Each structure stands twice: as structure tokens, then as C-alpha cells.
Image (cartoon, rainbow, N blue to C red):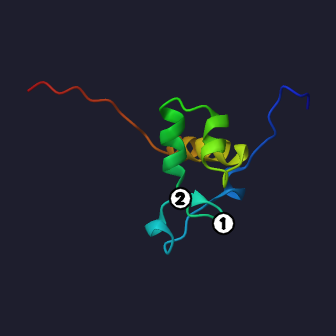
Amino acid sequence: MNSDQQPTIDYRDRITVNPSILFGKPTIRGTRFPVSKILNLVGHGMPFDEILDDYPILAKEDIYAAILYAAASFEDQDIYAFSYRG
């Protein structure tokens, strides 16, 4: 692996779902930090370094894991677009 490549991350090592933590929402393992919060920050264009500065409990691998978790959650779903003519 050269310096330009990111390490392979298995989101299952960093994301957990526990019914007694945040009502079962996916969180970063060992925290109460929801995956949805990370995705919202990334989706609104917040740079990774700024996220890490604002939330020192997180690691860059947690951000990647959140994105991979979101992608994996759509892998087995069939999503169809319908047009409505009312």
C-alpha cells in the first residue's frame, strides 16, 4: 500500500447497534455518537479534519466506517423511482 491509499476499513469493527443505546440507532463503537450525525456533517460538506477537530472522540476511520455503513445498508434494497401523474 502506498501513501496515497487509505487502509481497508471494515465498518463492522467500528459501528455498533445496541437497543439500549440511542434506541438502537447505529453508533460509533464505545460511544453514543450516532452514525447519522457523521453522515449529516459529511453530507453538508464539512471537511473530515474539521469534524475531527469539533468531535475529538472520533477518528478518521470512524468517518469512513459511517460512510461504508450507509452504503452497505442500501446494498440489498431495491429502490425504484415512480412518477405520479395526478
Report the residue that reaches farthest toward the bottom. 20
Q: Quadrant of residue 18?
A: bottom right
Residue type highlighted by circle 1: Gly
Task: Report x, y in % for residue 34.
Answer: 52, 56
Give x and y (percent) for residue 62: 67, 48
Instruction: Tell me the number on the disc at residue 45.
Output: none
From the image, tell me which residue sits under label 1.
Answer: 30
Asked whether 33 or 4 is in front, the reply is: 33
Helix, strand or loop at mark 2: loop
**Left or right of 81 in this view: 72:** right
In depth, the one of 84 and 32 nearer the eye is 32
Tell me if 37 is positioned left or right of 1 in this view. left
Q: Nearer the viewer, mark 1 or mark 2?
A: 1
Which residue in the protein does label 2 denote? Answer: 26
Give the residue drawn at x 56%, y 58%.
33
17 is higher (above) or lower (below) than 49: below
When asked about the image quadrant of residue 49, the answer is top right
Distance from Cα at disc 1 to Cα at disc 2: 11 Å
Q: Quadrant of the N terminus?
A: top right
Which residue is at 26% across, 29% downward?
82
